[in-house]
Amino acid sequence: MKPSIPKGTRDFSPVEMARRNYIFDTIRRAFRLYGYKQIETPAMENLSTLMGKYGEEGDKLLFKILNSGDFMKSVRQEDLESKNLPRLTNEMCEKGLRYDLTVPFARFVVQHRAELQMPFKRFQIQPVWRADRPQKGRYREFYQCDADVVGSDSLHNEVELLSLIDYVMEQLGINVTIKVNNRKILAGIAALLNAADKLVDITVAIDKIDKVGLENVNKELLEKGLSEEAVARLEPLLTLSGSNEEKLARLSVLLDGQDEGMKGIEELREVLDGIAALDPKATVELDVSLARGLNYYTGTIIEVKANDVEIGSITGGGRYDNLTGVFGMPGLSGVGISFGADRIYDVLNQLDLYPAEISASVKVLFINFGEAEARGAEKIIAKLRRAGISAQLYPDAAKMKKQMAYANAEGVPYVALIGDKELADGTVTLKNMASGEQTVVTPDELVARLG
Amino acid sequence: MKPSIPKGTRDFSPVEMARRNYIFDTIRRAFRLYGYKQIETPAMENLSTLMGKYGEEGDKLLFKILNSGDFMKSVRQEDLESKNLPRLTNEMCEKGLRYDLTVPFARFVVQHRAELQMPFKRFQIQPVWRADRPQKGRYREFYQCDADVVGSDSLHNEVELLSLIDYVMEQLGINVTIKVNNRKILAGIAALLNAADKLVDITVAIDKIDKVGLENVNKELLEKGLSEEAVARLEPLLTLSGSNEEKLARLSVLLDGQDEGMKGIEELREVLDGIAALDPKATVELDVSLARGLNYYTGTIIEVKANDVEIGSITGGGRYDNLTGVFGMPGLSGVGISFGADRIYDVLNQLDLYPAEISASVKVLFINFGEAEARGAEKIIAKLRRAGISAQLYPDAAKMKKQMAYANAEGVPYVALIGDKELADGTVTLKNMASGEQTVVTPDELVARLG
């Protein structure tokens, strides 16, 4: 009987909303400062747009929407009898919920190509839905905050996105390390080991080095069929140390003669030099073991870690070659990043980094002493609001104790009292709830005081 | 092959988003100034929460989500054979998409009652989904912007909501008439005519008076079984003219002796006096023929019309008695309003009321003359962004003509040029795209000029 919400979904209270808005507003403001333009796409996409874009597992994790009206009309008896779930789904559902923002963005670009200026810098902040098994920190509905530039191969885009990440994290007060790599370097390494076909195995293994250590990585590589010699040659690449410049120099020696690897080094040097020239607050670090999104990214790979909290990556991204090919518009490359709002929320909570101004309450609550006083209060409240100061009247002439308890529970910083005397004098008694101090002021002084 | 989106849904371009954000930001700022607190609820609710809340027709208009995994597992053979769609839906779907914000709000209040302070003033701005037949101005996905106070019977809440509507419409520059009525007056009128059982027929008929005229209303009432005498007695009530005070005085005479009707008059007088004392810019008008949401509202009824555009109501609301009874928490009354964002968007478009500052583009685009120049530009761009000025570099060193065409198409107000000479001098050539005027400035002057 007690009402509930579907597992893996969340209600957000006023306090949670104030905090979430602080994060989204900070990111949105930064996106705009950097020239990214907002778009929104529908929550529902045609299943033909979504299916097959996230692998077989992803197809299962899409939320499908039952057709309106007679949803059994196209269902075939044989599919019912054989309980062929994929075919039945297809016959009963035309639409599904957005699974990420990338596929809808690709669909948008193709559909609206005639109206878009290239390069197109877009941002999008919307919820996505996945029928994942819910667990701590993983939800079935969550927001993604994506910025992408498409239609430009210039590495200035990478520099700009790194600067954007640095700016957002500085604004939020989170100390971060931005790890950068390039898929071409990973490909070069695989080629060097005569194991180009094992690129994915190699990257999956080395991606775990922070967690499991070098020895276990070597063990896994041997199990995957790499020769002892190859594993030995890989080791100095995985244990690179020193400055980015030193790492690049060392890589240039190790990958000498590997065209693709050398191209990756060149790209990475340009990106790292570009961001270094802008004096970022974040540490920007070349990390050869960084291998996220390898089936997707073709150049730069970016991942952001919070320095002061044990948590997975809080932002990530990279360059891709062919965003829209699957929708019949080949050759459109781009680079993008995605802020992980839920993890950033966890980091800010753990470090208690929310500014004091963030509050769900009004600045001042007017106590209601009865009809005439309330009418007087309403006029002054209107004046405050016109001056941009949030204010409200307690609507009922309840007992003073009850109204003050409400003010306390809501965390209202000021309470205003208009009783007989104030009403006659045209004044307000203002009480600072933190200090307990009371002052009698005119309405104009009140505006000045709270403004 | 060309990708598309489901019918009745929309993509929003950067220009449309800039305009929509202007509307949503204005409403959101007003909600906060007035002390309403934001919540969000999941897009998906359990169907048990949604079903039966919107009538039989509403149940059909809910978008249902196919269960993940083996959705055929609970389907009974007999329901398949008889093609019992409601039962099959129930067996295959546990969740549906939010149809409005009111039912999720009621569910939220009951679920979180222990954490909420009453009176609870909440606002919520989120999309809702309805499987309606799409037509001009009616979409399957659209935003609602709702503010409600629950847990207080005080009419100060009505006054505050009317003031809030007035404030929002003034901020948006829309001249409006706010029509106000009270369901108790309509009930009093029905009782007066000895037709309390025909309240709905009467209100449905008189609600059309603006469209079809008095004679046709009278004809419909006779057809519905009202006596000639009752229709004659109703006529002076429908043709009330003069000021609100005059209308109230006349109603007091006509409804004399009808307790419920007289109570409605008293409430309405208090609300109208309260808002009049705040000098609203909007015309606030008592309209006895206003009869929206009669199966739901129990006291004040509010509807807002734009004065300068032919369009339906752009905002509406009212008082209700029993928001949460259906979820096992009886007796919670409240009052709320809902801004119609899509219609407000249409009004602002038709009247071209968007402020000039609303733009999807950056303030200044830096032309890219090559590597060294672009690096110099990136430093100045970083400086501008830190000063809150949006700026971007054209990422590729393309032909000047192409870059300027891009600036024009994007509607960028300023273009900045850093060539050999500027790079050597540490200056920037700033071009005003409207006037064509060019000035050479230092980076600091640039910040001052564009800030």
Image: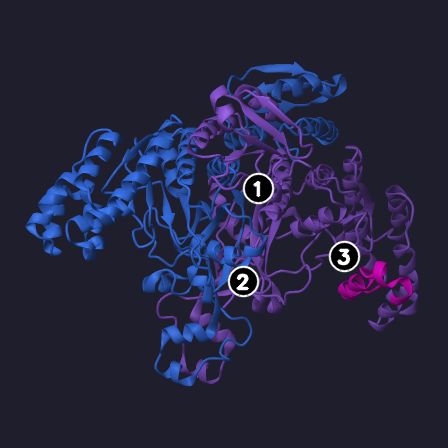
Chain colours: A purple, B blue
> Which label's residue is closer to the chain start, 2 or 1?
2
How packed is label 2: few (under 14 Cα within 10 Å), some, or many (20 or more)? many
Between residues B21 and A224, which one lies in front from this camera angle?
A: B21
Magenta residues span: A194-216
Residue receiving disc 2: A5
- The kind of residue tagged 1 is Lys
Q: Earlier in the sequence, mark 1 or mark 3?
A: 3
Q: Which residue is mark 3?
A: A291
Q: In 3D space, how far apart are the residues under numbered discs 2 and 1 (Cα atoms)?
A: 35 Å
Type of secondary structure dominating the magenta stretch: helix
Which percent across, then down, holds residue A92? Answer: 43, 71
Disc 1 designates what residue?
A401
Q: Which image quarter: residue A187?
A: bottom right
**Label 2 in the same subunit as label 1:** yes
- What is the chain letter for disc 3? A
Within the image, what quadrant is residue A216 found in?
A: bottom right
Q: Is residue B88 magenta?
A: no
